[in-house]
Amino acid sequence: MSDTNKKWFSLNLNSKHKQTSGSCGCGKTSGGCNSHKPKNEELNEQEFFDAAVDASIGEERRKDGFDQVFDVKMSRRSAFKKLTASLLIGAGAVNTSCSFIAGDETKEKAQIDWEEQFKGNYKLMNNDEKKATVDRLVRSYQLRTGKTISMSSQNAEEDVLFGYAFNISKCQGYMDCVNACVEENNQDRSSQMQYIRIHEMKDGKGFNFNEADDNYYHEVPAEGHFYMGTQCFHCDNPPCVDVCPVQATWREDDGLVVIDYDWCVGCRYCMAACPYDGRRFNWSKPEVPENEINKNQHYLGNRLRKKGVMEKCTFCVQRSRKGKNPACVEACPTGARIFGNLLDPNSTIRWVLENKKVFRLKEDLGTEPKFWYFMD
Amino acid sequence: MRRLKVFKRLVIDSLDVMTHGSKKYHLWMALLTFIMLIGMYCYSIQLEEGLSVTGMTDRVSWGLYISNFTFLVGVAAAAVMLVMPTYVLKDIDFKQAVLIGEGLAVAALIMCLAFVVADMGGPSVLWHMIPGIGVFNFPNSMLTWDVIVLNGYLFLNITIPFYILFRHYQGKESKKSVYIPGAILSVFWAVGIHLVTAFLYQGLQARPFWNNALLGPRFLASAFAAGPALIILVLAIIRTYTAFKIEDKTLKKIAMVVTVAAQVNLIMLISELFKEFYAPTHHSESAYYLFFGLDGKTALLPWIWTAISMNVLATVILTFHKLRNNFKILFFACFLLFVAIWIEKGFGLIVPGFIPGPYGKIAEYTPTGIEIGVTIGIWAMGAFVFTILARTAIKIETGELRYKKKA
């Protein structure tokens, strides 16, 4: 909480220069939250990872039994947090207050689970509430795994409208974008979920999706073929948003169509309504190996999902709102992918729209995608 | 206070009726309970593992559950075909059947809601959908309209028969001024539930197979054929096994309703087929998949052709007075029609909407055993609910169950 430039919650454990001494994000000043390693400044990412693996048991080496629970210095904030927690009514609170034997962490976990189960829709939250839920999720992850993630609730910035352009002439079908996307966005590995589909089309047949193959396993570029990628097009008039019965998906002010994974009821109506195959469903509990988890997360973006909810491309909201390109754009070896702010007259995307012959898919449906195709 | 006392008595008496009966009755209920338990077991697996235990995928994201839901909304709506003549047009012949029809509507609606819940990825957060507590995306989402109309219709179909039976239970006549407004409302409401359910699909520009103006009217026509057909079959069973008197005249009049609806439904089918196949466009591919298969993928072919031939055969039988007036043939035709429309308005409608996918991908859908188990379990639950309702209603209507009748 030392970095005053940021308005969102961030632990910044992965960045070397921003780490400060004193209190940590979880509010505890001693090593109670396991996120405090005095030598963090000198660690590189790999070392930090090893240290983090060690973190949960490292605690027990130093302290034992009684001390683990009670030898914790409390800051004013954490003391206040505990006070409010104990004042809350409801089953979770009853559960918490009734268990004399349960440890501090078990109680806190129950409290977090309770508050998370009955929190509101992210779309309707004010900034404080957004920060509170992000804090809870970070803390919950810490309690469960002993590891620290950074999660942002950064809002859309003014005068920003994100757009995307795809150069069909350049794409060679390497699928680096697909892999980068999966890694960046913590997608389920067991079902091999992918937001991006690369369609391999035959030369001379035009854009014939019927004869295209979006699941090829051979060397590319294949003779006599060209490639075209699809993903969520972040429509300006998105049909998926209208049909959602609980407003769990909506269009943000910077044009991103996002989902509150915790508010989604899993009816899959949006999936039926999307003309672009842009949405994915978690048919079972998503699995990401612990060491492959991308810990730089955004509430609306790549944070870990649960089973039975929708997800989709967010133009990497966790990156794009920090001024970076989405992972697919960065990974593309051919430069076929262009991303930028449509409201900035000097952006590359504006140059493409103004100087190339661009088109969009299924324009007749009136969905106004913010994803354009063009050729050299 | 007195009313409360009578109500308490009614509850006790009907519990007594529900738990006592012939051996056949007990066997029937035990069988249904057993099937329901299997269904619950299958559902518990689905809850644990997620919807991956069903045959649904990202390519075909709605399957057997939503198919049955769609069909059963039609069955529920069909009660109106008995309510309207009885309460609004004052046709005495329907009077005996109407309570059974409304009981059937209640059972069908409960099954509808169960199918929707079974299809949800997160049943534990369903409270997000409750207006006032959650966020209700009304009027934008047709699904919220559906929640309103289905629950409203359920309310109407519980309260009106309950009022009438409650009066009869006390040996009094029901007051027309009380139930007629509700009955008239339920007539419009019934059309509403099925039209809204059709709009659920009709409004999706992403799925050309559904996005046609005939879908809503065709839903109504098929519903008014399949629903009353089921009512005829149920009445036939009730008439055989209970003391409840149902005149031949009543069955014949309902058969007339079924016939007209089936004929209209067939005309609409021809219109649809003409549109899809006379000048086929890119948008006809789903229909091609359904009727002829695409790229060697032909999973729905046997189903849809069975449905079409049953549909045509049943409609032809019903059209001839001589055949229709022979009860054995009538029941056979009703059975054919019911099954045909279950296929056609069930997975014959839902699954092809997703095939081919938005980018032409043809991935087929086959339900898994667990999915089928849950589905059969929900049907058993519907039958269970209906049996209880019908049994109590019949006992009251025949005068066996009366307030303070027996010591």
Image: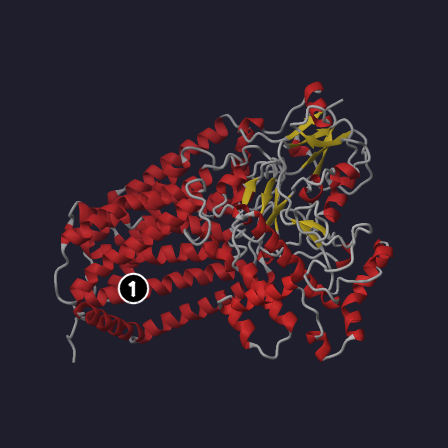
Chain letter, disc 1 residue: B
Residue B84 location (% of width, % of height): 22, 46
Q: Nearer the viewer, residue B131 or B289?
A: B131
The residue located at (17%, 72%) in the rendering is B403
The image quarter containing residue A359 is top right
Instruction: Identify whether A170 is placed above or below A145.
Output: above
Residue B136 location (% of width, % of height): 44, 48
Quick one: which residue is furthest to the front in this view? A76
Which SS class for mark 1?
A: helix
Q: Nearer the viewer, residue A179 or B283?
A: A179
Instruction: Identify whether B169 is placed above or below A357.
Output: below
In the picture, the quarter occupied by the N terminus of chain B is bottom left
> Could you tell me how many numbered marks the image carries?
1
Q: Is residue A364 left or right of residue B193?
A: right
Q: Which residue is mark 1?
A: B389
Q: Nearer the viewer, residue A142 or B73?
A: A142
Residue B314 location (% of width, % of height): 35, 45
The residue located at (46%, 61%) in the rendering is B376
Q: Is residue B21 left or right of residue B199?
A: left
Q: Is residue B237 left or right of residue A124?
A: left
Q: Identify the amino acid type marked 1.
A: Leu
Residue A227 at least partly seen: no
Residue B305 at least partly seen: yes
